Amino acid sequence: MKKKGDIPSILFAIIIIFVAGVILLVMSNLTSQIYQGFDDYFDNSKYNGTEAHQALNTVQEYEESMWDYVFLAIVIGYVLMLIILGFSTQISAVFYFIYGIVAMIGLFVGVALSNTWEKMVETDALSGTVARFPITDAILNNFYPLFITVVIVITMIMLFGKSFLPGGEEIR
């Protein structure tokens, strides 16, 4: 099946990256509470200072930073996917303006999602957890509209810049 356009992929990427950040933040908050419950139990029992307690502390320290790097890997994966799809998709230059309009809609959605992230992490339940997510918070809070703009520009260059390659023909 020939794919004739890559326009919806950017909107899917914007939403999926946000949803991945929210899911990873909530999962980290939940597992942190579970580990803290186990740690409290170990502190007040005969297992205090045992190998099980030390292993729990090691896993807890690893888990606190792991999810932030998982989110970064998801973001990098989606950007690479958009670049590869943009380069491999055959599209006419007629769709340039349509893609620009859809990109503006995606930018507005990204700004709304960035504001949603900001309000969500201000809650008491997640404010402590977001401190362990500096990369995720930076991307989804402060730089999400800028990040979306850069991804849109790179994708547009990959989609529509193929016809300007030497020889003047698109790569098929």
Image (cartoon, grey):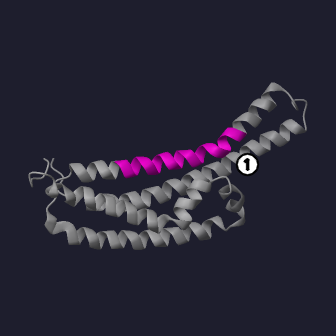
Tell which of 123 and 107 is nearer to you: 107
Q: In the displayed structure, would residue 132 be above or below residue 41?
A: below
**Outermost residue to the front:** 166
Q: Indicate yes or no whether the magenta region holds residue 75.
A: yes
- Provide residue 39's location: percent of width, then percent of height: 81, 40
- Provide residue 17's location: percent of width, then percent of height: 46, 56
Q: Quadrant of residue 150?
A: bottom left
Tell which of 144 and 31 is nearer to you: 144
Q: In the displayed structure, would residue 138 be above or below residue 109?
A: above
**Outermost residue to the top:** 51
Q: Is residue 109 left or right of residue 125?
A: left
Q: Amino acid at mark 1?
A: Gln
Magenta stretch? 61-80
Residue sitting at x 67%, y 60% = 126
Q: Quadrant of residue 98?
A: bottom left
Q: Is residue 90 left or right of residue 103?
A: left
Label 1 sits on residue: 33
Q: Is residue 42 left or right of residue 5?
A: right
Residue sitting at x 81%, y 32% = 53
